[in-house]
Amino acid sequence: MQRFPREQYLILQGLSQESGEVEIAALAQRLEVDQALIAAGAQILGELGLIELREVPRKQYVLKEAGRAAATEKLPERRVLEALSEAARPLTMQELPPLTGLESRDIGASLRYLNSKGWAKKSGPALELGHAAEAGLAGPGEDEKLITVLAGDETGRAFEDELPESEIDLAEALAQLKGHRDLFEVRAKRRRLVQLTAMGKTSVQAGIGEAREVAQLTPELIVSGEWREVALKSYDVNLGVTPVHPGKLHPMQRVISDTRRVYVEMGFEEIRSPMVESAFWNFDALFQPQDHPAREMQDTFYLGRPERIALPADRALVERVSQTHENGGDTGSLGWQYTWVPERAETSVLRTHTTAATARALAENPNGPRKVFCVGRVFRREAIDYKHLPVFYQIDGIIIDASATFANLLGTLAAFYRKMGFEKFEFRPAFFPYTEPSVEVFIWLEKKQDWFEMGGAGMFRPEVTRPLGCDVPVLAWGLGLERVAMLRYDILDMRSLYMTDLEWLKEVPLCR
């Protein structure tokens, strides 16, 4: 007699009484055994060839809270339709809220459904009844029938094959509810069906018994010979376990830490600079003219305290920067051909880039060979969207070397991104006031099917380097780090990095 652990024995006995396939959930209910245990036992018996398992895709429709409310309070488009019918005249958007009990935004959201159903249409500033208004008033639509059926169940759920086909045109109901994500959702489920195989039927007919299941083989079982009558409990190393969420750095901090590590590995030294910076170091030292649009109030945060920051004590340096702006100085350039105003250079700003730090470093020690980088927050008056924030992190770096070339710059950037785990990137020609030639770096974001701009790079122009005392080529770049984090952690919206989503923070893997 072949013996099986209790759940497997019950499954074989239960299926022997069935003429065909049976759903695991129904089998577990009949056997009065937890469904998870039956599913696990069925998996083992399936591997032994005693039963056959089959999964059938199944759709489940789940009503959300707004959908439950719509079942009793009516859909917004129906409330607008009834208000228009009762008024017997077109109604403006301002007249509808008190008549429908809806907010203006809800009425606006209902317009697409009113139009698609033909219940109402815009007529100048007002809404009037549409060509299908009479049919709409005659009774509930297919979408409303589906909502009513789902709301009739205590759980607000129903499988596709459980819906009364004679009462609801499901295809039409789903078409009408398209876009109503606030009302309900469709979930992909599976039906798991089992039945005995020919081998399983033969085993049951030959006789099966229940074996006592033990977790380990003990000396007592061996000495007594009872080991022949017991079944050793198997261990599935793929089974889920209770998740452990250890303390760890925030994902953004890990990107910053990895960035520092990569640059140090590449032989760079880290520098720092203040977040409150003078316009001199933020703009003027980088050959950005004093009337450049980036220096306007709508692009830059200017401070009231301190309102001004003194120019560098090295007056010769300030004079060289001034002359470069006005007529090119000794750089061979024509400059910007305007009168440079010291007071504008003293203006206090929140730094718009960490390039200000590398400009300071270049002025302090312009002799190469030298490689430095700076990681820090920068501030810009950006319109907030999925890839722009007014406060973000930037990595800036420069290489000072008499033999440095543009190819060295591209190679350095490529090495950085490869070390950060990216392979698909490209360089595009660009223009910046302080570098020539210049490029922008783009990385491919698969989920968005879009190229992401990561930042700009180039070779500092002589108008930048010579006033600061440097006569050799300087490679420079400024790159955004939030975008690196987005790509690394598959985030489609930069704002998510700074939201207190504890569940996401728990699940972010330590290694990526």
Image (cartoon, rainbow, N blue to C red):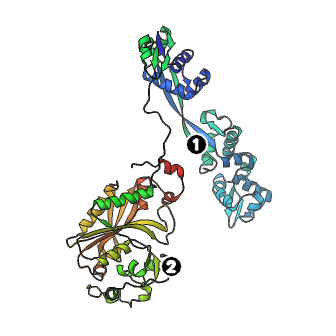
Amino acid marked by disc 2: Leu
Above or below, 512 relative to 273: above
**Left or right position of 424 against 96:** left
Above or below, 58 relative to 376: above
Residue 431's x, y, as percent? 35, 73
Q: Residues within 10 Å of mark 2 (few under 14, many from 20)?
A: some
Amino acid marked by disc 1: Val
Residue 103's x, y, as percent? 70, 60
User: CA–CA distance between discs 1 and 2?
Assistant: 52 Å
Instruction: Please tell me the numbered disc located at residue 310.
Output: none
Q: Residue beneath label 1, please?
A: 186
Helix, strand or loop at disc 1? strand
Residue 153's x, y, as percent? 69, 37
| Residue located 39% across and 63% down the image | 453
* Mark sitting earlier along the chain (1/2): 1
- The residue mark sitting in front, 1 or 2, is 2
